[in-house]
Image (cartoon, rainbow, N blue to C red):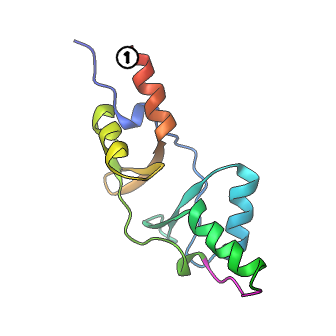
Amino acid sequence: MSKPITARDYMSATLITFTPDMDILAAINQLIEKRIAGAPVVDRQGNLVGIISEKDCLRISLHASYHGESAGTVAEYMHGEVKTVDAEANIADVASMFLRDDYRRYPVMCDNRLVGQISRRDVLRALEALW
């Protein structure tokens, strides 16, 4: 019998992360430059403390540019409650999570440490391999 496909097998281990004290406009600039739709937020010890999404950034950008308001830090806009996936989670279970939730990506954890990120597209690639 073959080994089950897990989140670890298809996650991206190379991540762009932000810190809570980072300027939000600098974070938005990185999202644009790197062509990514969101990123985990980690503290100085590398603990996952939140996530910032493209949608959050759109709201901030509108207020900062159109309304002339100052922006602030990542901590002011990030979501502190983050749904995560265990690195050893079965890919079918991860697919089910994406079907239930509106998220485009989940941080992947191993022993309470951030080890990667898995997206809808990553799961599609994994399922395609099973066809």
Q: Nearer the viewer, residue 97 or 81?
A: 97
| Quadrant in the picture for residue 39 | bottom right
The quarter in which the C terminus is drawn is top left
Secondary element under disc 1, as helix, strand or loop, is: helix
Task: Farthest residue to the front: give it.
Answer: 66
Above or below residue 44? Residue 39 is above
Classified by dominant secondary structure, the portion drawn in magenta counts as loop
Residue at x 28% of width, y 20% of height: 3
Q: Nearer the viewer, residue 7 or 56?
A: 56
Q: Nearer the viewer, residue 131 or 18?
A: 131
Above or below residue 121? Residue 20 is below
Task: Farthest residue to the bottom: give it.
Answer: 69
Q: Which residue is mark 1?
A: 130
| Quadrant in the picture for residue 123 | top left
Above or below residue 31? Residue 104 is above
Left or right of 26 on screen, residue 13: left
Above or below residue 50? Residue 38 is above
Left or right of 11 on screen, residue 82: left
Q: Position of residue 53 (x, y in %)?
A: 55, 62
Residue at x 73% of width, y 56% of height: 32
Q: Which segment did they paint magenta?
A: 68-73
Q: Position of residue 6 (x, y in %)?
A: 34, 32
Q: Is residue 69 magenta?
A: yes
| Quadrant in the picture for residue 2 | top left
Q: Is residue 4 magenta?
A: no
Residue at x 47% of width, y 49% of height: 105
Q: Position of residue 93 (x, y in %)?
A: 27, 38
Q: Position of residue 78 (x, y in %)?
A: 51, 72
The kind of residue tagged 1 is Leu
Q: Residues within 10 Å of mark 1 (few under 14, many from 20)?
A: few
The quarter in which the N terminus is drawn is top left
